[in-house]
Image (spheres, rainbow, N blue to C red):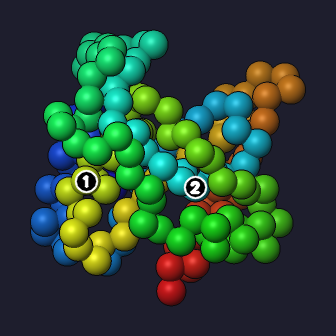
Amino acid sequence: MQIPTRFGEAAEKVLETAREILPDAIISVGQAGGRKGITPEVVAINLQEASISDNAGQQPTDTPVVAHGPAAYFSTLPVRHMVESIKETGIPSYLSFSAGAFVCNDVMYTLLHHFRETKVQCGFIHVPFLPEQAKENVPSLSLDEMVKGITAAIAALE
């Protein structure tokens, strides 16, 4: 599903769908320009800190994702196994230890908080720019490469 780049609303859309389909795992995907490969995120922090506005014009600073929530949550996806599975396809991949503090982190933290006492695995994967988005010397992957890599990451769940 496609979700809006809006603090709070993005995660709520995922949670609404999760209540309907009762998933075993939720893998959110977002774009992070400058990344050289597909990067499963290891940790989400309890912070909304935006240097630019989201698509609703919100630009929070020093705001918790969840009031009184823990400082961070670790992904419950098998992120190291996912990286290895992606690399086996020939697509570059590595762990990322910062989902940032924008909407991607907000989604990851919210889902991990919501599903913290369940068996539902949650996490986030960042992908680089598409070639048509990248300026000279900026890393990118084709859409086909991204699909191949994300498919390998999903297969790592089994």
Residue 25 pos. (x, y %): 36, 71
Residue, far bottom: 158
Give the class, few, some or many, for how many residues have Cα within 10 Å of label 2's Cα (few <14, many ≥20).
Answer: many
68 up-or-down from 111: above or below = above
Number of the front mark, 2 or 1? 1
Secondary element type, mark 1: helix
Say what amino acid the circle numbered 1 marks.
His
Q: How many marks?
A: 2
Question: On the image, numbered disc 2 is attached to which residue?
Answer: 40
Q: Is residue 78 left or right of residue 7?
A: right
Q: Earlier in the sequence, mark 2 or mark 1?
A: 2
Residue located 64% across and 73% down the image: 81
Q: Position of residue 37 (x, y in %)?
A: 73, 49
Which type of secondary structure does the marked residue at label 2 adopt?
strand
For image coordinates 38% across by 45% down, the residue present is: 72
Residue 5: in sight, yes or no? no
Residue at the (43%, 29%) spot, across then down? 101
Depth check: 47 or 148 in front?
47
Tell me which corner region of the image, top left, top right, bottom left or bottom right, holds residue 148: bottom right
Residue of label 1: 113
Question: What's the mark number on residue 5?
Answer: none
Q: Image height check: is 142 above or below 80?
A: above
Q: Amino acid at mark 2?
A: Pro
Front in this rendered view, residue 115 or 142: 115
